[in-house]
Image (spheres, rainbow, N blue to C red):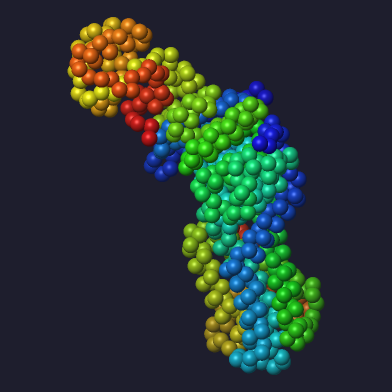
Amino acid sequence: MDSPAVEIVDLVKRYGGTTAVDGLSFRAGRGAVTAVLGPNGAGKTSTVEICEGFRKADGGTVKVLGLAPARPELRARVGVMLQAGGVPPAMRCAEWLRLVSRFYARPLDAGALLERLGLTGHARTPYRRLSGGQQQRLSLAAAVIGRPELVFLDEPTAGLDPQARHACWDLVGELRAAGVSVVLTTHHMDEAERLADHVVIIDRGRVVSEGSPASLTGAERQLRFRARPGLALEELLNALPVGSAAKESPAGHYIIEGQVGPELLATVTAWCAAEGVTADDLRIERRTLEDVFLELTGRELR
Amino acid sequence: MTALDLTPAPGAAPFPRMVLAQAGAEIRAMLRNGEQLLLTLIIPVLLLTGFSLAPLIDVGAGPRVDFLTPGVLALAVMSTAFTGQAIATGFERRYGVLKRLGATPLTRGGLMMAKTAAVVGVEVIQAAVIVAVGLALGWRPQGSFLSAAVLIVLGTAAFSGLGLLMAGTLRAEATLAGANLVYLVLLGAGGVVFPLTKFPESVRPVLEALPISALTGGLRAVLAEGAALPLVPVAVLAAWAVLSLALVSRTFRWE
């Protein structure tokens, strides 16, 4: 039980001339939720599908529960939710879940799982007539029904409405509480911040940063407000303590970083008064993973 | 809200239970699919009754039903093992079903066993219906049931190999079109309802080497003429089976 849930060292994956995964390394701990965060095309799905045994790596090593991903004994120990599809279109919702449950020795009750994910009313609906969100939830159910030690969820909440997304988040929380290791990919930073013990930020096939959500966003806080665009920030900067920073991004949205406290707040509001502007939506908050990602890659997450 | 015990308790089900579960799902899918039923049951039964009752073709001496029933049994085998299986498996590949099943404890070997069991299960249903219709039309079968069964098993292996060869290499739409086209061509040129003797002498050796002709000819030799196990059809079917299944194992793409 000492080996990590997933251990990836210098992974490389190429498709023809394109390098999708370019020397990527990270570990996912046992019993923890690890979120692999990155924009579309960052190499998330390639990485996860190599861990699931669907694709072969072109370089580097991958260990899943201490074993090579292709090892057959992993099939019973690892649950998989594909990004899309995987179910025959004419198969009824409950029929699919019962079928998958018969492949495992001690499965969860299919009916209870359907109920838990709000699918009881659709038990007899063929897969192709389920909404995108219902299809996602059925795939999630099939990933956990065999009571796995480790679950891979590839963009589990893509296309879910807010209510279904919360149901999914709750289930991930329960899996973690039950000691299941979870590795999920997402391009929603709020999902990673909310669910994950460990976040791995990847871009262009490489890890650009990793850590707990708190360590990534840092203790540093920001002051944000909205006002008319094009305010002259130089004067404000002169009034602020040395080491502070002020920027307008995007137009009309101002971010002040530094020793955010009562004094800084007073300086900023005084400056606003002098400029004759009202600061809307004035708030003090932490950096988000989105900010971190932007700083690390110079690109928007979505 | 129901409490779910998500505590890890991993483990694969016993192999036979997995295969049976998958085979049951495959049989239900085949029987539920309207187009499949058309191919596997309705067309064979219509051909058998239509051509038995109406003197549209010259099938030589003897009652027409004695000639037609073995041919239609062969057609039924082809429709399930080849056409139906090729189309279903091609779309399973396209929809990621084969990939997703690959992430469960059901092994690829187990999946193939389940598919074979499902094909045989549906063939049993087809044979029961066709034999009943044939008997009702006055068919009097000769020969050994065992010899017919051997031919049907070999035919199933050969047609499954050809069907999976298409499903595992072509796009699903190409498999759909191709499998239906091959079905039609072999229905016309494989001795199912039209005797091979109606074709020009020059093309007959080619037609006789087709798996469908080997199966119709073999079944007819046994069931209409009471022959012992006919060795040429057995050899032709075995050759198709070995060749196609060997190619499948080298070329089949699961994704």
Is residue A24 something that shows in the picture? no
Q: Position of residue A212 (x, y in %)?
A: 50, 20
Q: Is residue A248 above or below residue B182?
A: above
Task: Please name the residue shown 48% across and 28% down the image.
Answer: A192
Q: Is residue A171 above or below residue B133?
A: above
Q: Position of residue A72 (x, y in %)?
A: 66, 40
Q: Position of residue B22 (x, y in %)?
A: 68, 53
Q: Nearer the viewer, residue A44 or B74?
A: A44
Q: Quadrant of residue A187?
A: top left
Q: Is residue A67 above or below residue B34?
A: above
Q: Is residue B175 above or below residue A216?
A: below
Q: Position of residue B203 (x, y in %)?
A: 54, 82
Rendered-image quadrant of the N terminus of chain B: top right
On the picture, is A190 further left or further right than B113?
Answer: left
On the picture, is B9 further left or further right than A281?
Answer: right
On the picture, is B144 further left or further right than A153?
Answer: right
Task: Please name the residue shown 57% across and 68% down the image.
Answer: B35
Task: Please name the residue shown 68% across and 45% down the image.
Answer: A111
Q: Quadrant of residue A251?
A: top left
Is residue A163 something that shows in the picture? yes
Q: Nearer the viewer, residue B229 or B186?
A: B186
Q: Nearer the viewer, residue A204 or A284?
A: A284
On the picture, is A227 further left or further right than A102?
Answer: left
Task: Please name the residue shown 58% across and 61% down the image.
Answer: B88
